[in-house]
Amino acid sequence: MSNLLLDVDNKSKEELLKLRKDQLYQISIDKKLKVNKSLNKDSLVNAIIKHRDDQIRLQNTLFDDNPAIRFHRGHVDYRLPFLIISKIFQYYWMLCTNHTSPFFSYRDALTITLVNKQLYGIVTTLFNSVFIKQMNINSGYLNLEPLINNELLRLTRTWCPIKQITKLHIHNTMFEQFVNSTDILLNNLLTTIEKLHIYVNKSSYRDINYLTFKSVASKMPNLRTLVCNNVNIRYSLINAIATIKSLRKLDLTHTYKVRLGSLEELVLTKMPLLDQIKLPICDPVNIPNSFRDSVISLFNVSFYKPVSPKQLLELPNLKKISFLKLRPNIFKYFKESSFNVTYLCFPLNGNIDHWLPIIEKLISIETLEVNTQSLGSKGLSSLCRKFKNSISPNYSRFIIQTYDHYDNEKNNLKIGLHYSHQKLYPRITSDSTNLRKIYFVKKI
């Protein structure tokens, strides 16, 4: 029987019909076909032949007939080794690319792809993070699917250098069409995605069809990070996300849970292999005892009720913790002997004095992040002076979140660390200022 199965792809329909029904069923299972054991021989043979034809068509589309591979861009004689040329190009790209508005860099990259296949290949590796925005379509269109599909099919054009997406940021409507598309080239793009960020309009929270995530489980085998914004979290959705076995990081910070109890317990029970979970609000008390040893990071921590001294939390492997609300005396909740975090983030609406005794006890701390919202320039200076007095030799980074402007040249905050850089985050409303993250790093 084993010799019979080795060359099954070369057999005709008549030859397959000569096999026994149990042999045909075993062939279907080996090829991972979804067939019922009660099917007759003709149905099993038809399923095997259809699968074989689909594989041949996939091979032709991706390789044999793929215009992006067959497209000949001529021959070029280089005066420098191509490796040096490619390195120069990559460094130049990193220096000149404007990530806020990459239109001109994209246009230049399209020109470079016309030189030859080698440079075309380099350019495709540079476009690995893609943001597909929501389309502004006139409400008069009743059927949006053809228009959306037309936008997505632009990714499969010969001239498009986007061939290997590792990070995808996409609107819910576009994403559902993307995942449900039968286009072979589009489906091939999905296989390389490692981080997926799905968002819905900020005006309201929406539902996402749980069947969409079941498709993700089969079409994105390398997906490790999932971020959902403005999405309603239901029990069926958690079950669907749990089918993504490769998932290691889940961010549900900006979501709304619908008729769910302890989201912490539900997520950990359904997805025990996750390394990092971000929930709208996380109460560590709800973490089952069997999972506490595996917890590495906690975000948006807020306790709903006090913890008795006999029930202090013990999370021996916890390294990162971020507090949502002001809870200065954290050792009322955690056992001090097991609290060895290296990263601490907390909100600060006023004086830092009540936090300093806590910080000094964290002998393993390496990164401290303070969310000040708006303290003003004097408040920032005071904060940094007090931080300098209690600084630990283990500190490697100090991060401040603020809406206040920080001028490094005129107001260098001398805190024993070097000013590194700032990150600006987009405005929430038209009259609000940008949120800034100011980074200070250890002197080398």
Image: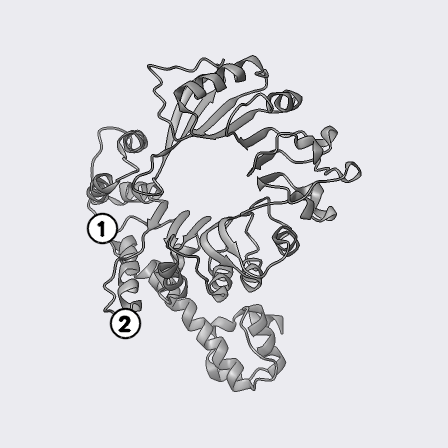
Gap in Å between the C-alphas at discs 1 and 2?
42 Å
Which amino acid type corresponds to the residue marked 1 in the rendered image? Answer: His
- Under circle 2, the secondary element is loop
Colour basis: one colour
The quarter holding residue 57 reads: bottom left
When the figure is inspected, residue 435 is found, relative to residue 215, above or below; the finding is above
The residue sitting at 72% across, 40% down in the picture is 307
At mark 1, the secondary structure is: loop
What residue type is disc 2 on? Leu
Q: Left of 247 or right of it: where is 128?
A: left
Residue 260 vs 57, above or below: the answer is above
The numbered dot on residue 72 is 1
Q: Residue at x 66, y 54 (%)?
A: 269
Tell me the quarter of the image containing the N terminus: bottom right
| Residue marked by disc 2 | 142
Q: Is residue 56 visible?
A: yes
